Image (spheres, coloured by chain):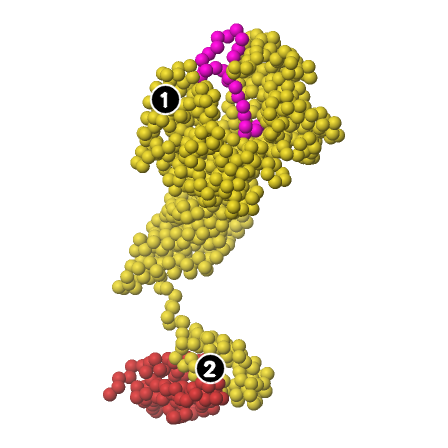
Chain colours: A yellow, B red
Amino acid sequence: MTGRRPPRLAEWLLARLVRGSLGGEAIVGDLAEEHHFEARSRGHAGAAVWYWREALSVGGRVLLQRHRPRRPAPSPFPMPGESSMSELWRDLRLAARLLVHQRAFAFIVVLTLAVGLASNATVMALIDSLVVRPFPLRDIDRLVQVFGVNPAGGQFADRAEVSPADVVDWQREVKTAESLVAMEWWDASITSGTEPERLQGFRVSPVFFDAFGVGVSMGRGFTADEGQPGRDRVVVLGQGLWQRRFGGDPTIVGRTVPLDGVPYQVVGVAPAGFDYPFGSEVWVPLAFSNAALEHRENRYIQVVGRLREGATPAALQAELATVAAHLAKAYPTTNRDWTVNVMSLSESVVDLGAKAFLMVHQLATILVLLLACVNVANLLLVRAADREKELALRVALGASRWRVIRLLGIESLMLAGLGAAGAVPLAWAALAGCRAAMPPSVARFVRGWDQLDVDLRVIAGLAALAVASTLLFGLLPALRASRISLTDALKSGGRTAAGSGRHRLRNAMVVTEVAVALTLLVAAGLSVRGTLDVLWRDDGYAMDGVMTLRVSLLGGRAENGDQQRAFFEQVLTDVSGVSGVDRAALANVVPGATRYISRTVDIEGQPVLEAGRRPSADYRVVSPGYFDALRVRLLEGRAFSSADTADALPVAIVSQTFARRTWPGQSPIGKRIRGTGADEPWRTVVGVAHDVRHHWFADQIAPAFYVPYPQAPSSDMVLILRNGGDPSPLARVGRDAVRRLDATQPVYEVRSLRQVRADGAVGLWFAAIFMGAFGLIGLLLAAVGVYAIMAHAVRQRTHEIGVRMALGASRRAVVGTTLGRGMALTGIGLALGLTGAYLLGLVMERTLFGSIRLDVVTFVAFTAVLALAALAAAIVPARRALGVDPMISLRSQ
Amino acid sequence: MISVDTYLGEFEHLVLLAVLRLGAEAYAVPIRAEIEERGGRSVARGALYTTLDRLEQKGLVRSRLGDALAERGGRARRYYAVSARGLASLRAARSSIDRLSEGLALEPGRVTN
């Protein structure tokens, strides 16, 4: 019996196809009945074939019939009495059909717009995450950072830190802030478990977690009495640290963990994602000792305030300024002329210059979008020329000008919408690349980097830009198309009727393309060149083949100078014997590191200034081999030697800038200086070293002085190892040397000096890559755009060229006029572009920390590149003009 | 009096006549066989269904479902009958053809006028 049944799949399919039609069920039944007969005459297989054929044919036919009357092609003309909504709907459907029919055209337009919009979205997301709302905190508007303002001036004068005593006085007086939180850097090593690990931590006022409004996810924050010396051995762990080192142990609260060898009781775990400031993972209460409170000249505290409901940063600024003025009067030696600077926390955590830096890039992306829009506008104009007859017919049949504009506008809007949709994944990928490319050691200093994403805000921005660009690229072609002259367009020779207005528009587009592209290209060139300059610049020391390892001693090893000296000298001796190590040295800070230590100095024979105004210099504690290991040249005198022991004459080496500023025109050798402090000895200057630029972005090289390690031992030093080539094996050598001596001492920040520099300049890298990408996109868009415009111009002039050639014009003359016109426009574009590039270059010079220098070579080189690209883009259509057969072109009339 | 304002297509005309001939047995399978046999032309099933559908929409035929039958996989037949309006259309078409044909000799080989 089953053999007589029609094929099931075919029957099911047929039932789906005819479902809902009038005779639906009966049709399936009829075919089953006929199949019954067919099976007798044709056999089983033949009947199955027959059934399939009939089922598809009947089903298809019925389906078509059912759908045809309900969905007629939208009429391009309004029906009398039609509502404006359904008119709009019709326009939408018409536009959609057009895009589907002209897939290739739509694809190119959408791709162009997507690239332009994605560039913008990427930089928008950067600005949004890094500048607008770097903190995902709820009460972020009420949080402020309070800086001191150094009357001595300097690059970062208005972001100075504050002395403990000043903070305590502020805390007592302040009314407009609920709380002022004092915070002190506190790197700590955790030594429980196997491998010691260095953690970023901060000592903070007990009110810290309340002030930020985040609380803790487990246990409690600090109580007020834990801000007293002796009661401060409690700690709040970061969520990540708790997971990583303690496996998320729920019984952690109440246990003790050893930090820097001292037991701290865990009282709480911070909420997930909270790592302020600077990627902190441990927080302990900040308790000021009496000694700390006595020295108002030691400014090392950062202050964050939580404003009272309704209070403004300006109110706090005014209030604290009054307090500061009182303090300046009461303690003139340390506080005279020191004032305060209150900034919103969001603003203060933004990297200095990041805003301007990102704005420059946003400007560049807007130029990229402008190029994209011009290209698209040209494509639409070309197409509008091809559609002239269709549009003219519409107007002739009674469509109003407004309706034609609206139809074209809807098409443009649809294209922009698709472009924006395409931009989302592109921008997402770019941002994912950014997140992945940023080294974690830097990312923790860039607030908001980890939250880079294409979120709703960015998408809203994208949508706004898409609409704006629609106006830009769609309006002009639409207006132009709506002004069609009927008779001209419908005449068969309509193509030659292009008016002078169209020429002007096309010329303007070529000029814009070239000008904008040159601006972008030069900006890209300046950015890339500036970055390479910084990375390969001679900053006074050799960074190749050098590995650095930081060691912070704990426990007994750190107890006194003798212990520290003994440990580090032993490490030096050990590594010096290892094959593959050419030079070994110690320093408290290596060039390029984020950490840096400076001290105020007294100069013998010069009046001692009051505390706030003493000259300050970078303070470097180094072993005798330091200058040799980093190839820092000595300009005068001698380097340190093994004879400069703890008991020998205290000596120092000064940098050339130090020497020039302190003893202009004199030799510093034999002069004496000392770091400010009670126990500091006078040191005799024995040498002058070449300047070393510590931070690539420092606009001036700071003066520096060096003292020999045995005379100023410290528990926190960097081991510097040099070999002939690739320094990476040296990391193992250094680690092993320390571990052999004492496996409980943490070794961290293990990086080659080249890496230190690269990490430090990673922002510049990003700038260079971004600008480079924008420049390339600009070049590509402009080349394609100019080509398209020129090609269309030649196409429209086919008739004219034919006439010229028929009348005896030489090929040279034809190419000459075609090419000449293109090159004249290019020339104007280049001139405008050079002006634009110069202006943008000036802005970049100011915003990128002096890494950018306007150099003639870049300007000339890229002008040439663009001129060649434009020439190439014009030459192809010009050659095509040669191929015009006069007879054919005339006959096409 | 039923006003006849519905134009009959040629195939619609044939379908209506076939339905009329078959009487109570008029469902799609015999209708198609009838047209193929007497009309001397092949009929696509799909075309027949869509035409029946259209005729019913125009009110020229009525349809009813019969009983479910086992050899049809448990599905009913849909029987068609010509409506009064359909009959009027057929008559109108016949009379206009008659009037137009009157006096014309259409036999092969004899062409007058």
Measured from the top left, where is residue A292 in percent x and y? 47, 22
State how far apart marks 1 and 2 are (Cα).
94 Å
Q: Could you tell me which chain the residue with mark 2 belongs to?
A: A
Q: Is residue A601 magenta?
A: yes
Q: Which mark is residue A324?
A: 1
Query: Tag 2: Cα neighbours inside 10 Å, few (<14), some, or many (≥20)?
Result: many
Q: Is residue A418 above or below residue A501?
A: below
Measured from the top left, where is residue A673 in percent x and y? 55, 12
Which one is nearer the viewer's eye here, A536 or A353? A353
Measured from the top left, where is residue A681 in percent x and y? 57, 13
Q: Are marks 1 and 2 on the same chain?
A: yes
Q: Magenta part mainly helix, strand or loop?
A: loop
Measured from the top left, where is residue B95 in percent x and y? 32, 89
Q: Is residue A323 above or below residue B8?
A: above
> In the orientation shown, which residue stands out farthest toward the top?
A605
Which one is nearer the viewer's eye here, A548 or A207? A207
Pair 1/2: label in front: 1
Quadrant containing the C terminus of chain A in the rendered view: bottom left
The amino acid at mark 2 is Val
